[in-house]
Image (spheres, rainbow, N blue to C red):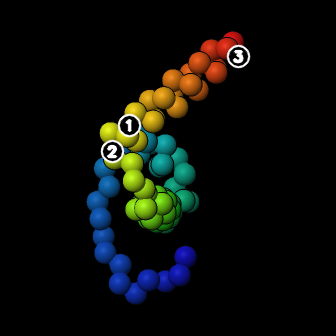
């Protein structure tokens, strides 16, 4: 990652069990891992926002479509079993 001259600090809360797992890998720079995960998520959200900006679907339309897709996928997987 490129050096960023102006960094700010944030506090991140994680479950105790996750912290224990992280401690088992003390050599890992968990701040860098979190920074990259946040950066990746923001890039994905920006793409999603750009994609949906031109959409004429309402939120309700999207929910209905999502339910139909979920139902169709569930039926497909039931047929495989």
Residue at 43% from the left image edge and 62% from the top image edge: 54
Residue found farthest to the bottom: 5
Query: Label 2 neighbourhood size at 10 Å, few (<14), some (14-19), many (20+)?
Result: few
Front-most of 5 and 46?
A: 46
**Looking at the rendering, in which quadrant would you find the N terminus?**
bottom right
In 3D space, how far apart are the residues under numbered discs 3 and 1 (Cα atoms)? Answer: 26 Å
Front-most of 20 and 14?
A: 14
Residue found farthest to the front: 56
Left or right placement of residue 78 versus residue 54 in this view: right
Front-most of 54 and 21?
A: 54
Q: Secondary structure at mark 1?
A: helix
Left or right placement of residue 44 versus residue 78 in this view: left
Q: Position of residue 26 (x, y in %)?
A: 51, 56
In 3D space, how far apart are the residues under numbered discs 3 and 2 (Cα atoms)? Answer: 32 Å
* Dot 1 and dot 2 residues touching (CB under 8 Å): yes
Q: Which residue is mark 3?
A: 80
Q: Which residue is mark 2?
A: 59
* Dot 3 and dot 2 residues touching (CB under 8 Å): no
Circle nearer the viewer, 3 or 1: 1
Vertical position of residue 39 compared to residue 59: above or below: below
Residue at 54% from the left image edge and 59% from the top image edge: 28
Which tag, 3 or 2, sits closer to the chain's start?
A: 2
Res 15 visible = no
Q: Give residue 65's quadrant in the image.
A: top left
Q: Position of residue 35 (x, y in %)?
A: 45, 65
The numbered dot on residue 63 is 1
Left or right placement of residue 16 versus residue 20 in this view: left
Residue at 56% from the left image edge and 60% from the top image edge: 27
Vertical position of residue 7 compared to residue 53: above or below: below
Q: Secondary structure at mark 3?
A: helix
Query: Label 3 neighbourhood size at 10 Å, few (<14), some (14-19), many (20+)?
Result: few
Q: Secondary structure at mark 2?
A: helix
């Amino acid at each position: 990652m490129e050096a960023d001259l102006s960094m700010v600090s944030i506090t991140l809360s994680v479950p105790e069990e996750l912290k224990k797992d992280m401690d088992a890998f003390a050599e890992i720079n968990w701040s860098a891992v979190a920074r990259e995960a946040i950066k990746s998520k923001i890039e994905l959200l920006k793409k999603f926002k750009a994609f949906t900006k031109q959409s004429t679907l309402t939120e309700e339309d999207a929910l209905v479509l999502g339910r139909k897709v979920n139902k169709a996928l569930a039926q497909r997987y039931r047929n495989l079993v």
